Image (cartoon, rainbow, N blue to C red):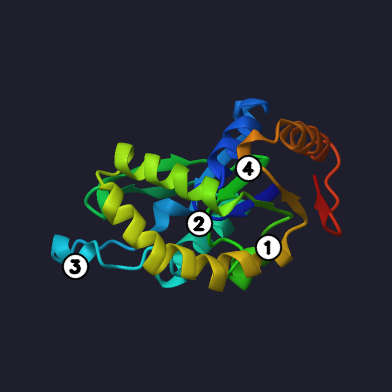
Amino acid sequence: MIIIGIAGGTASGKTTVVRSIYENLPSDRVALIPQDAYYKDMEHLPMEERLKVNYDHPEAFEFDLLLEHICALKNGIPVEVPVYDYVTCTRTTESRTVNPQEVIIIEGIMIMTDPKLRDQMDIKIFVDADADDRLMRRIKRDVRERGRTVESVLDAYETRVKPMHNLFIEPSKRYADIIVPQGGSNHVAIDVLTSMIHAKLIVSPAVQGTSTF
């Protein structure tokens, strides 16, 4: 089994990179684990208070459960991944069954900030993108998909997202084996990554050193 971690700032293009890799690999050999599914459930808080929580801080995530699930998959045990509702900031009563596969892709902004989780990864990828581009994508995504206003997104970016990126996410880039600039628009990098993972399905020694596409 190969564990691939794909990190990067908010709206950097991580999901696009993951989707492109996934669609170019045999679907019956790859499983996806989004870190966003492991946001802590805020149902115990009033809605007004939920919106004030710093969701861009490591403490917003249940790392222990994510690590438990990765270890279970490595031991051949299926897991039930939570389903998170971004509009209500709560976990739903549903879950998604993920079965052990030859390739497990973990994707999320904070996955390289946790040493124990990092140690489970065979390949660590950091998707890099310009801050202005990330902000524009975040505004479009949060307004369209998460019921936010432009004003609330800008406020969150200035008070939480940008400071947390500089404090936690950007420093985690030093742990990456591979850095992908230009986010999901870097098709050359995505093609190279896909080819490398294809090769890893046959021969799987650990990747060493850090590369930049």
Q: Dot 4: within a 10 Å radius of its alpha carbon, few (fewer than 14), some, or many (20 or more) residues?
A: many
Q: CA distance from mark 2 to mark 4?
A: 27 Å
Of 52 and 38, which appears nearest the observer?
Answer: 52
x and y percent of residue 4 in the render? 67, 49
Q: Residue at x 68, y 40 (%)?
A: 102
Q: Earlier in the sequence, mark 4 or mark 3?
A: 3
Residue identified by numbered label 4: 183
The amino acid type of the residue labelled 2 equals His
The amino acid type of the residue labelled 4 equals Gly
Asked whether the residues under the numbered discs 2 and 1 touch, taking CB atoms below 8 Å apart as contact, a structural biologist would say: no
Visible residue check, residue 61: no
Asked whether the residues under the numbered discs 1 and 3 touch, taking CB atoms below 8 Å apart as contact, a structural biologist would say: no
Q: Earlier in the sequence, mark 2 or mark 4?
A: 2
Q: Earlier in the sequence, mark 2 or mark 3?
A: 3
Residue identified by numbered label 2: 69
Q: Which corner quadrant holds the C terminus?
A: top right
Between circles 2 and 3, the one closer to the viewer is: 3
Of 2 and 126, which appears nearest the observer?
Answer: 126
Q: Secondary structure at mark 1?
A: helix
Residue identified by numbered label 3: 49
The amino acid type of the residue labelled 3 equals Glu
Between circles 2 and 4, the one closer to the viewer is: 4
x and y percent of residue 186 in the render? 70, 36
Q: Residue at x 24, y 43 (%)?
A: 147
**For residue 173, which numbered disc appears in the image?**
1
Q: Earlier in the sequence, mark 1 or mark 3?
A: 3
Of 16 and 43, which appears nearest the observer?
Answer: 16
The amino acid type of the residue labelled 1 equals Lys
Between circles 4 and 3, the one closer to the viewer is: 4
Q: CA distance from mark 2 to mark 3?
A: 29 Å
In the figure, residue 13 lies in which quadrant?
top right
